Amino acid sequence: MTTIEVAAIEGRGKGVIASRGVKAGDIILRDSPLLLYSPNPNSSNSRLYCANCFKSIAPIPSHSLLITCPSCAMGAVFCSTNCRSTALSASHSPWVCNALLSISSHHHRHHSDDFIAQARFLVAAYNLSSHSPADFHLLLALQGGTHSQPQGHEREQAVALHSLIASLNPPSSFPLASPGLTAALLAVDKFNAFGLMEPFDLPPLTGMLAIHDISQGREICISYFPVNWNYADRQRRLSEDYGFECGCDRCQVESKWKHQDHDDEDDSMEDDEDDDFPHAYFFLNFLCDTDNCWGTLAPLPPSEASQPNLMECNVCGRLCTKELDFKNDDEDMQDD
């Protein structure tokens, strides 16, 4: 019996519900992404990650001990020689290597971080067409991949990004990079991209865990952004990128607050936790307390937990044990 099923949620359209009772730590969904890319390169002031499987790489005493790309000045590093060998023949081909170097050295100072992230996506997407044509066609078949006609600022951005990609001399094995194809790929990224945290298995798989028990028939909700984002920023991004307005418990409470800057929001959060803040127990039980992390703690699957109440942060990877404290049942735990 499957864990989830798609159902019509009254007043909200299609959603996902639990088709049976789910326990905390159960894997609700496991899938392999069509395309993985990082919006930012490795740098001296960021945590290193493997350019193939995207696992974080622990700090090492000397840069010379890193497993690096033999011809890349982009700082592409790998967690193993196997990952490097796989990447050099697929996701980190010579063209990708040169393209990312060009984007970083000549364009970063002239464009926003969002523009650079989209350029890195297009490099990964066009490269996918060469080493995995079947996955490239599946990518284009996703929502947004056909009849995409961006308007206004999005159209200007698509034209600029297409001009950039065309200047990078894509190999002849790639499909003809037309403005229409570039716009379609950007639309696919907008409608379907999902921010993923480590860890990944090999081949890359990602799993969605239940952070608390979910009863049969209950809607399964997720958090779209780090929990420290304020109400106005969350609603704006949800509307622009996902096309809906959130009405979860937290948003309903915060929509009534007069101030939306971070300091006022933190103060209001503390004031409301004892009375009018039904999701306060989410923060109490599942918010990582590592400084400036803002990640979510989730119980490990029973097969991976070496001790009771062992939880892992989806951002920093920290493991901790925690006794969960609930006011009521899972009705208090809905949070988008």
Image (spheres, rainbow, N blue to C red):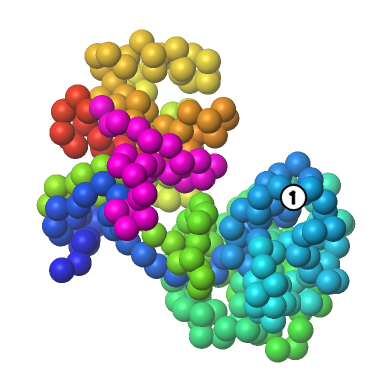
Secondary structure mostly seen in the magenta stretch: loop
Q: Residue at x 54, y 42 (%)?
A: 316
Please tell me which residue lies in front, 41 or 12.
Answer: 41
Q: Residues within 10 Å of mark 1 (few under 14, many from 20)?
A: few
Vertical position of residue 104 compared to residue 274: above or below? below
The quarter of the rendered structure image containing the C terminus is top left
**Image spot of residue 70 (x, y percent):** 83, 71
**Image spot of residue 267 (x, y percent):** 44, 12
Type of amino acid at the residue the image marks with label 1: Ile
The answer, for residue 224, to whether it is visible in the render is: yes
Instruction: Left or right? Give the position of 198 relative to 128.
Output: left
Residue 73 belongs to the span the image colors magenta: no
Residue behind mark 1? 60
Q: Residue at x 57, y 30 (%)?
A: 292
Part of the protein shown in magenta: 298-325
Vertical position of residue 140 compared to residue 102: above or below? below
**Image spot of residue 106 (x, y percent):** 87, 57
Vertical position of residue 227 compared to residue 256: above or below? below
